[in-house]
Amino acid sequence: MPIALGRFLGELALIVVLEWLRRWYTFRLRPNMIGTYILSQDSPPGGEYRGPMTNLSNKSPPVYNIVLLGQTQAGKSTFLQGVRRYADPACEIDISSIGGGNQSHTSEVQMQQIETSFPLYRVYEAEEDQDQSASPHPTREVAMESLLRGCAIREYKTRIDRMDNLVAHKDKHSVYPECLIRVFDTPGLEDTNSYDERNVAKILTSLSSENAVHLVLIAVSSGNPLTPGLVEALKTYSKIFSAMGGLLAIVHTKFEYRTQHPDDKKTVAFMKERAADLDRIMGRNMTHFMLDCDLDEDRPIHIYLRQTTIRNILLAATHNTPVALNTMQLYKTSKMQDVDALTARQQSQVKADLEEQRRHMEEEQRKRLADASDLERRINETRGRIRGLDVFINKNETDELVSMREERFENGFNFFAIPQEVELKAYDLPYKIDHVEVHCDGVRVLHQDGGYGHHHWYVKFVRFWHMHGIYHAKLFVKRRNKMHQEINQTKAELERCNRTKDDMICRRSEIIATNEFLNGPYGVRRELEQKQGVCSEIIAQCSRETLTLDLFNALVKGGVYENTPAECMDKVSAFYAAYSHAEA
């Protein structure tokens, strides 16, 4: 019996010592073990190891831009105040910036900038014998997993609301360097006080001075149903910001932490179904965050859960590959599509009427001018085709990185686990890898193969038994390499179209010079053909799904899509007619 007791006490002492060493290692040495492997054309074979979000210039902290979208009263402005409080727990909440009722408080894009190193928030037990009127003094950290897991639903709610002898504190030190986070709070789409197109233009104009966007958050109130208006707004986000698809994430605001017990099957099933519905509406698998918006809630565990969620959201911006704004293509809004469809039909009828006028000209004039008229029509059609090919090439012949594959490993901490060797691999990829991003923690890489310039990627590593192990790899291909075959085919077709257009222009000039068609009836004929060419250009512009950033802003600045559809149709026709003339 004494031997067994001695063995038990010895093992207990060993566990205590190992736990102390783990904490010391985590806070003292861990910064040297966390980082990002970056494989690119500028890095040596095998990748260059850099610290997390390392600021290589050492002159100014890196900047990450987050766009915050959502319907009116979705909690966007409240989230913005929560970000301020995460960076500075002592800051005063700006109540005037938070709307109420059904009116949107945000009518203009508002930018909030914070400087943070992404510190952790922890919950500690306070001294029991201290004066209760004094601020609690932390003595021992409380493990959230052991506190909240393995208890009944009723006890779970009691524990999460616990306040006695607990206090939430922000760590003074972090494994990350200082970064600038800029959050752009936007007006709600589908707001009856404004226009979707003008709101989108406000967002893009506010970002015009920025080089790129790192994260697009869509705030959805977890307590509201997915109404037709909300579904339409989400589809609008998904379509307009399709070029930022890899940056989109959903924040379920006004989320009740105390109701989310793993055994509460009804609530868990509801949230899973809601997330699946949102993924289906957005047309892609989204990243989901759950966040409460009660900034007055000061119970320690609620503070810990809220601040931890905000930290994870902000860190997501640092892990994404940013999207450059100068080459981004924007999809038209629903109203733009509807008005453009009506305008295209109207212009088709106008074009048919012009053709009818042309047919009623005298037969002798028709025969004499048939060749010139046909050439004019074919030249206009060829020019429209050339513009479409140029748009395709400019859109796809870029170094924009497109996600091709993701591999992920994650395993929690276990005192009695043995070192675990893990292999992640991706073979027979359709394209050569142009870029690899790796986020790892608590693992040691043993061997890696492939990567940049190869059709495969392989890594073998071992997880440290005393740490939470994670290894997340993203494989990218440049858009120009992915679309290489289509780009070459388009360039070949573009060259043929240019040669054909030049030949037709020369032939038309010869007909005009030899037959003196500029006088008399030909002047009328040419005017009709020019009007038909303008109609063709308007129809081509209305038929396109995407717009350049400059063209989108020009349309919004001119108020082209405001007022009734009939008025919008006239303004669209006038705008594109002038745009076509200026472009020519």
Image (cartoon, rainbow, N blue to C red):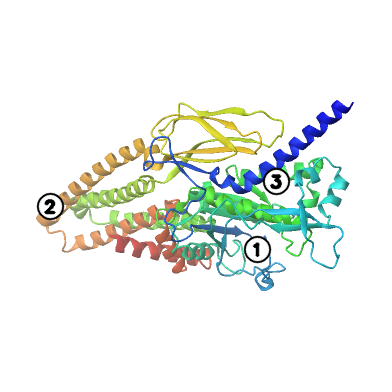
Residue drawn at 48 percent across, 48 percent down: 321
Q: Amino acid at mark 2?
A: Glu
Q: Is residue 417 left or right of residue 205?
A: right
Q: Using the image as rendered, state which of residue 89 and residue 198 is in the foreground.
A: 89
Amino acid type at circle 1 is Thr
Which quarter shows the N terminus? top right
Question: Residue 16, percent across and down?
Answer: 75, 40
Q: Amino acid at mark 3?
A: Arg
Q: Earlier in the sequence, mark 2 or mark 1?
A: 1
- Asked whether the residues under the numbered discs 2 and 3 touch, taking CB atoms below 8 Å apart as contact, a structural biologist would say no
Q: Quadrant of residue 570?
A: bottom left
Q: Residue at x 12, y 52 (%)?
A: 510
Q: Residue at x 67, y 52 (%)?
A: 309
Residue 313: mark in rendering: none
User: Quick check: can you spot residue 560?
Assistant: no
Give SS at disc 1. loop
Give the secondary structure at mark 3: helix
Q: Which residue is mark 2?
A: 510
Q: Which residue is mark 1?
A: 72
Give the distance between the C-alpha atoms of the residues marked 2 and 1, in whole angstroms: 62 Å
Residue with the mark numbered 3:
274
Label 3, residues with CA under 10 Å away: few <14, some 14-19, many ≥20: some
